[in-house]
Image: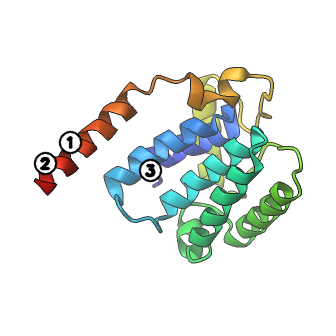
């Protein structure tokens, strides 16, 4: 019923709290299913994970900028949120609460998305167990690799993709 990438996103978001991985998983899925649509629900969820990643690192300006973009997308996506097993009213309340915390430079706290589908929650819990983590686990704010994942990961594939895009643009303009 739900795309595997979405379930994996939720497992990382609520399990190991690897928001960077949430971004990676959904970005790949978005590119495969709705590429180029910057107003996609997937882009909104990606931006939410990025904002949460920035907030946890006390990068309040980055967190505020990305959650503001996410809110703009979510505002018009009530049916999409419901289709993803998210309570739209509670979710938008959560987004507004997060914006306020970020604006006030409040410390990060683990975020729990208001999922309304019991079967989805059970699937996520089961997947957490399979991956060796716990559902609704608090974020380990002392885990350097988790907090600074963008600096510690292998970026070879990203660099190659950028170089190929530049080459393609250069060939197209000749």
Residue 171: x, y in percent?
13, 48
Q: Is residue 8 visible?
A: yes
The residue lying at 78 percent from left, 28 percent from top is 140
- Asked whether the residues under the numbered discs 2 and 1 touch, taking CB atoms below 8 Å apart as contact, a structural biologist would say yes
Circle 3 packing at 10 Å, graded few (<14), some (14-19), many (20+), is few
- Location of residue 156 with respect to 115 vertically, above or below: above
SS state under label 1 = helix
Q: Is residue 130 visible?
A: no
**Is 83 placed left or right of 155 in the picture?**
right
In 3D space, how far apart are the residues under numbered discs 2 and 3 (Cα atoms)? 36 Å
Disc number at residue 171?
A: 2
The residue lying at 62 percent from left, 47 percent from top is 50
The residue lying at 49 percent from left, 40 percent from top is 24
Disc number at residue 3?
A: 3
Disc number at residue 167?
A: 1
- Location of residue 45 with respect to 69 vertically, above or below: above
Sequence-wise, which precedes: disc 3 or disc 1? 3
Residue 20: x, y in percent?
58, 37
According to the image, what is the colour scheme of the structure? rainbow
Q: Quadrant of residue 94?
A: bottom right
Q: Quadrant of residue 95?
A: bottom right
């Amino acid at each position: 019923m739900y795309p595997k990438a979405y379930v994996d996103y939720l497992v990382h978001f609520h399990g190991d709290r690897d928001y960077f991985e949430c971004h990676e998983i959904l970005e790949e899925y978005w590119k495969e299913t709705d590429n180029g649509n910057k107003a996609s629900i997937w882009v909104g969820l990606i931006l939410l994970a990025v904002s949460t990643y920035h907030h946890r690192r006390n990068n309040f300006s980055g967190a505020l900028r990305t959650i503001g973009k996410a809110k703009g997308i979510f505002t018009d996506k009530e049916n999409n949120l419901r289709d993803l097993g998210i309570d739209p009213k509670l979710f938008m309340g959560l987004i507004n609460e997060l914006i306020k915390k970020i604006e006030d430079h409040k410390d990060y706290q683990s975020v729990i998305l208001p999922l309304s589908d019991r079967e989805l929650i059970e699937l996520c819990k089961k997947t957490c167990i399979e991956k060796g983590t716990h559902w609704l686990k608090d974020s380990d704010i002392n885990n350097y690799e988790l907090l600074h994942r963008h600096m510690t990961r292998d970026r070879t594939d990203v660099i190659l993709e950028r170089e190929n895009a530049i080459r393609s643009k250069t060939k197209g303009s000749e």
